Amino acid sequence: MLLEESDFNLNKFLSLSIQESNEYISNFKGFSNENIELLADSIFQICSMDNTSDSKKYLEKALQLYELCNMKSKTFSFKRENKIATIKNTLKNE
């Protein structure tokens, strides 16, 4: 619903570089840190259901979004750090 209402193009987003992704996200009015983290959660969930070669791409994007949240947030989140560690571990083992 978040993606549909904001006219967010997930396929385009997945194909962008880190810098381009950050710029793409910043162009959406109302995309708060919480929304970015929800997007990362959604992409991570998609990845957990997708056992194809694209799963690595989804993991990398989710990781990128969580790290963007860390850069933008003024508070430390153990939950977010655990998600980052899980993704890094998964990518390392692939």
Image: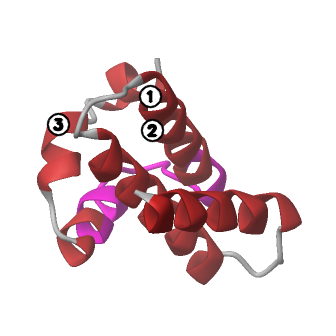
Precedes in sequence: disc 3 or disc 1: 3
User: Is residue 87 covered in magenta?
Assistant: no
Q: Is residue 22 visible?
A: yes
Q: Kindly identify which numbered label has been placed on residue 43.
A: 2
**Circle 1 is placed at which residue position?**
46
> Horizontally, is 55 left or right of 16 in the view?
right
Relative height, residue 7 to residue 25 (above, below): above
| Amino acid type assigned to the residue bearing label 3 in the image | Asn
User: For mark 2, does the 10 Å Cα neighbourhood hold few (<14), some (14 to 19), or many (20 or more) residues?
Assistant: many
Please state the extent of the stretch shown in magenta in the rendering: 22-35
User: For mark 1, does the 10 Å Cα neighbourhood hold few (<14), some (14 to 19), or many (20 or more) residues?
Assistant: some
> Horizontally, is 28 left or right of 37 in the view?
left
User: For mark 3, does the 10 Å Cα neighbourhood hold few (<14), some (14 to 19), or many (20 or more) residues?
Assistant: few
Tag nearer the camera, 3 or 1? 1
The spot of residue 51 in percent (x, y) is: 36, 28
Identity of the residue drawn at 35% across and 32% down? 6
Number of labels in the image equals 3
In which quadrant of the rendered image does the C terminus lie?
A: bottom left
Relative height, residue 19 to residue 36 (above, below): below
**Circle 3 is placed at which residue position?**
11
Q: Are marks 1 and 2 in contact (CB under 8 Å)?
A: yes
Q: Is residue 9 visible?
A: no
Marks 1/2: CA–CA distance: 5 Å
Identity of the residue drawn at 45% across and 38% down? 43
